[in-house]
Amino acid sequence: MAKKSPSSPKKPKTSNWKNTNAARYNAVVSELVHFSSKTVNSNAAPCGVRLTADQLVDLPYVAVSTMPPGIIPYDYYTGADVAGVVKQVIDGLSNESLADKYTNPPNEDELHTIRQASRQLDKSYVGGTDQVSVRLRQIIVQDRDGNDIALTPLQSAGFSHVLKNRLEEELAAQPQEHHY
């Protein structure tokens, strides 16, 4: 059997940066959320919720509402037509070199436009919640006075990403014999 020669490291895939105007960046960023109905049921009417630092609570467990701003990645809840713009916004706000990711990285003016649009993320946002989609589950709980309240649990793709990475780090730090 022939030995395989060690393969050379793969060059990261690059894509084209699509120049976008300030109005489009503002519109997309204004609707970025932490919680979305699209992860619960893709056939449900789209809705999403974004939390801010002043909405954090002190609880003895890990949740989106217990983590400081900037830890949980944002997601979109509207149509897939915004996915490319969202990727560029997230990349534009990161500290990574965009020359490695894009064949034609953005200029400083476009990055400034993204940073300006991102100021909206300091404000909470709720969208598409005028009516609860029949495709979303609800749970009934009682308040302190015994009144019924209907709650609609929404998932957070960003929280799942952070949790998965943290669990992998914890597992990697354990001795191999403790892995199962």
Image (cartoon, rainbow, N blue to C red):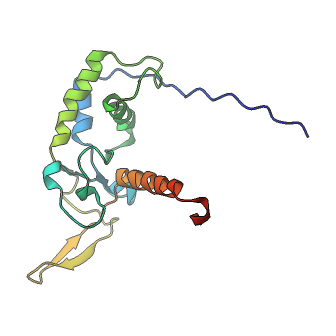
Residue 149 location, quadrant? bottom left
Q: Is residue 145 left or right of residue 99?
A: left
Residue found farthest to the bottom: 146
Q: Residue furthest front?
A: 175
Identify whether 92 is placed above or below 66: above
* Residue 157 visible in the displayed image: yes
Q: Quadrant of residue 43?
A: bottom left
Q: Is residue 135 left or right of residue 173?
A: left
Residue 158 is situated, as x and y percent measured from the top left of the image, at 36, 50
Question: Vertically, is 37 above or below 91?
Answer: below
In the displayed image of the protein, which residue is found farthest to the left?
Answer: 145
The answer to whether 155 is drawn above or below residue 72 in the figure is: below
Residue found farthest to the right: 1
Q: Residue at x 29, y 22 (%)?
A: 111
Q: Could you say where residue 87 lies in the image, as x and y percent from the top left? A: 38, 34
Q: How many marks?
A: 0
Residue drawn at (53%, 54%), measured in percent from left and top? 172
Q: Is 14 displayed left or right of 135 in the figure?
A: right
**Closer to the camera, 7 or 175?**
175
Residue 70 position (above or below residue 41): above
Query: Which quadrant of the figure contains the C terminus?
Result: bottom right
**Residue at horizontal 26 percent and vertical 30 percent from the top:** 25
Q: Nearer the viewer, residue 38 or 107?
A: 107
Residue 12, position as x, y percentages in the image: 55, 28
Quick one: quadrant of the N terminus? Answer: top right
Residue drawn at 19 percent across, 27 percent down: 116
Residue 21 visible, this orientation: no
